[in-house]
Amino acid sequence: MVAALRRAAARLGGGEEGLTVIEVVVAGIILVIGSLGVLGIVDAATRNTFRAEQSQVVNDVMQREMEKIRELPYGKIGLSGLPSHESGENNPNSRVSATAFYTKRDGTGLRPLVLEGSVAPGPEPFQVENVKGSIYRYVVWAACPEATCTNGDFLKRVIVVVRLDSTSAGGANRRYQEIQSQFLDPEAEPPENPGPAPGGGTVTTWILWLTDTTCDATEPQTPAERGAVGDHLAHNTRGVCADGTKNGNEPGAPDLLWPEAPVLSDENPVYDYATDVEPETDPDFDKGLQVKVGSECGAMPATEVASEPDADATLFQQLHKWITPPVNTADLELTGEANVSLWTQSIEHGVYPATICIWLFVREGGTDTALTHPFESLPYVTYSRATWPSSGWTELTVSVDLATGEGEIPVPQGSRLGLALSVDAGSGSGIQTLYDEPSFDSRLSLGTTGTLPTWP
């Protein structure tokens, strides 16, 4: 294009031949094509920026709304009206059933709504600069352990949901987000003093983002800093941080869980994190991490820390781990409320059912100890879809609440908090999940008390 324009300029400047019509047309076509490419890059960057802004606003609004409710007297924590059931998978009111509400997105955990309070159920519109959406609020009676309450009416669960308006820049079908928190009657009389007084300390939601940086690094790195610009082989995350980045059947460092969202950069952020697990027909659809189907959840060695290659050379492609840096505070505790948000889709646009298995664990030294969940006291939770999303990246949020027993769950100083993910048997070809990207910010949210860790 430059050469053509130079020739045109030379001729206009006094050349005898003049500028032919064909040369003008060719130069114009090249200029238009180049401009379209630039406009496409600018448009993609604008969309990424707006989606990252949306995610931050959603987190801020949910936290603000929960803090407002936390300031109310216990007797006022109830709904001022009865929300109505509405259809639609992306409508939180679809979980309303008469005077009850399903606390889990998979249609389980039906609990009676708490009425006669001052919490407006919504939907209530909000706008923060150019980000718009609606706020929904629900309050239900929660089951209260006998060691803490003399009857179940002393414990309430509050669910705050934010649903974004559909926009072309942010994406037409962004899934609604939610946080949940429990509220204990400060005047409850436990039959025996179980330890912490009812009410506990101030609850803070701790958000940890999944990254593509292995935990031998002190903070997330760009692809260039990792020495792996663009796509790369799957990380073997079955070992310890000191093992460093490993591919293939050799135990390596888990990936990092990090308390800051991925930042925007000039790089194309959508990479393939497992080039050794390739679809056969549509490699362009193959992005993020591909997790192959493994054994049944209970048979997967999710809390085993490997020190040598596995008998199954593909096990590392069926089970992936993320862990935090060492916790550097002494009073961090988990309240038991947790959610995992994953951007996911099927492999090769496959239409099939799938079930994922999620473990939360604490690593001390070289030992991983699973945190149990209230569902049959299992060390993991499952999330199933009759048809896994197949036409594009879809955000799914899974409740992975923990069984706290008596009091909260301490996270010892010097230990690491971890997350493991696998795909249960009978789940088609497996799943893809995308993270470490501002528009597709897969993350773990935890209710905590005490002091959150700080890292460089």
Image (cartoon, helix red, strand yellow):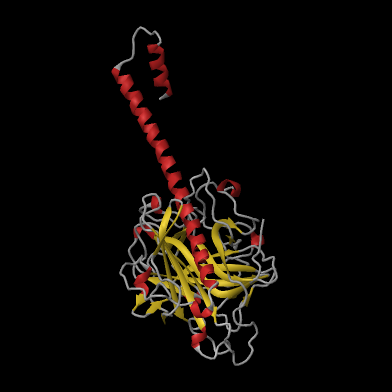
User: Where is residue 43, by image quadrant?
Assistant: top left
Task: Spot the residue most to the bottom.
Answer: 191
In front: 152, or 55?
Answer: 152
Residue at 36%, 80% (x, y): give it: 99
Q: Number of numbered discs present?
A: 0
Q: Position of residue 170 (x, y in %)?
A: 40, 52
In front: 24, or 214?
Answer: 24
Going by the image, does 146 lie left or right of 85? Answer: right
Going by the image, does 68 lie left or right of 347? Answer: right
Going by the image, does 196 lie left or right of 293? Answer: right
Q: Where is residue 365 in the image (x, y as percent from the top left)?
A: 68, 70
Quadrant in which the C terminus appears: bottom right
Q: Where is residue 179 in the image (x, y as percent from the top left)?
A: 49, 69
Quadrant in which the N terminus appears: top left
Residue at 49%, 77% (x, y): give it: 77
**Residue 304 seen in the current view:** no
In front: 32, or 186?
Answer: 186
Residue at 31%, 70% (x, y): give it: 86
Q: Position of residue 380 (x, y in %)?
A: 51, 75
User: Where is residue 134, by image quadrant?
Assistant: bottom left
In front: 12, or 111?
Answer: 111
Task: Spot the residue most to the left.
Answer: 21
**Residue 142 seen in the current view:** yes
